[in-house]
Amino acid sequence: MTTPWAVPPDLWAGETVAILAPKMTQAVADSVRQYRRIVVTDAYLFAPDADMLFAHDLSWWQREVRDFAGLKVSGQQGDIDALYLRMPDEIITLAPSHILQVRNSGLMSIRIAAMAGASKILLCGFQPELEPEKYPGLVKGLADLIAELRGVDVERINAVEVKSFKRWDFPVFHEH
């Protein structure tokens, strides 16, 4: 059964936290081993020794997650061996009359790192620009969330590019 949990605000105070999304390479995962790490859903396969595994959907947790010793955190309550963290949906405004309500484990993991006091967040494998039809609104949602983070540097690390962002930049992915 899930156990209610709140992110301690000093959990990773002043530290760099890498968030590993499933669209990742082992080389990128290995390059951030020295930092605190949150793995999002299947990305735990790249870093089974990460500090935290986050998956919002209860259905994802129906699989057996072996050999993961870090914190297991779910965004939904249920009959699983994980902590429960209530997280708000992301509200993404694409146009004045086009508003999306999104539940995305990657965006929620960014919020968790910020809530834990991270001073820098490395987004590894976050590439919603590659499949905008699969993730409607996620490109803008990611940009909005980065802009919302005050005092936190955010850097995206992908398999083919590293790009740093300040809160006023809009993330753009360029393939090489």
Image (cartoon, rainbow, N blue to C red):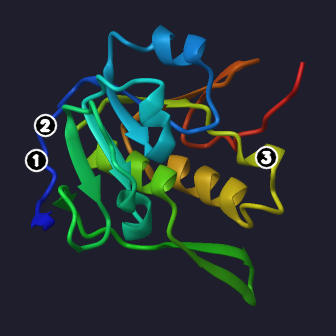
Q: In which quarter of the image is the N terminus?
A: bottom left
Amino acid type for the residue under numbered disc 1 = Pro
Left or right: where 132 falls relative to 39: right
Residue 23 percent location from the top left of the image: 64, 36
Given residues 164 and 64, the one toward you in this image is 64
Residue 129 marker: 3
In the image, taking residue 158 as reference, residue 117 lies left or right, namely left
Callout 1–callout 2 Cβ contact below 8 Å: yes
Which residue is identified by label 2?
A: 11
For the point 72% across and 48% down, which residue is it? 128
Image height check: is 56 above or below 110? below
**Which element type, helix, strand or loop, lies under badge 2?**
loop
Quarter-of-image position of residue 133? bottom right
Residue type of the residue flagged with mark 3: Glu
Residue 107 placement (x, y as % from top left): 49, 54
Q: To which residue does mark 1 refer?
A: 8
Q: Is residue 152 above or below residue 140?
A: above
* Whether residue 116 can be seen here: no
Rendered residue at 39%/48% (across/down): 109
Residue at the farthest right position: 176
- Secondary structure under tag 3 reads helix
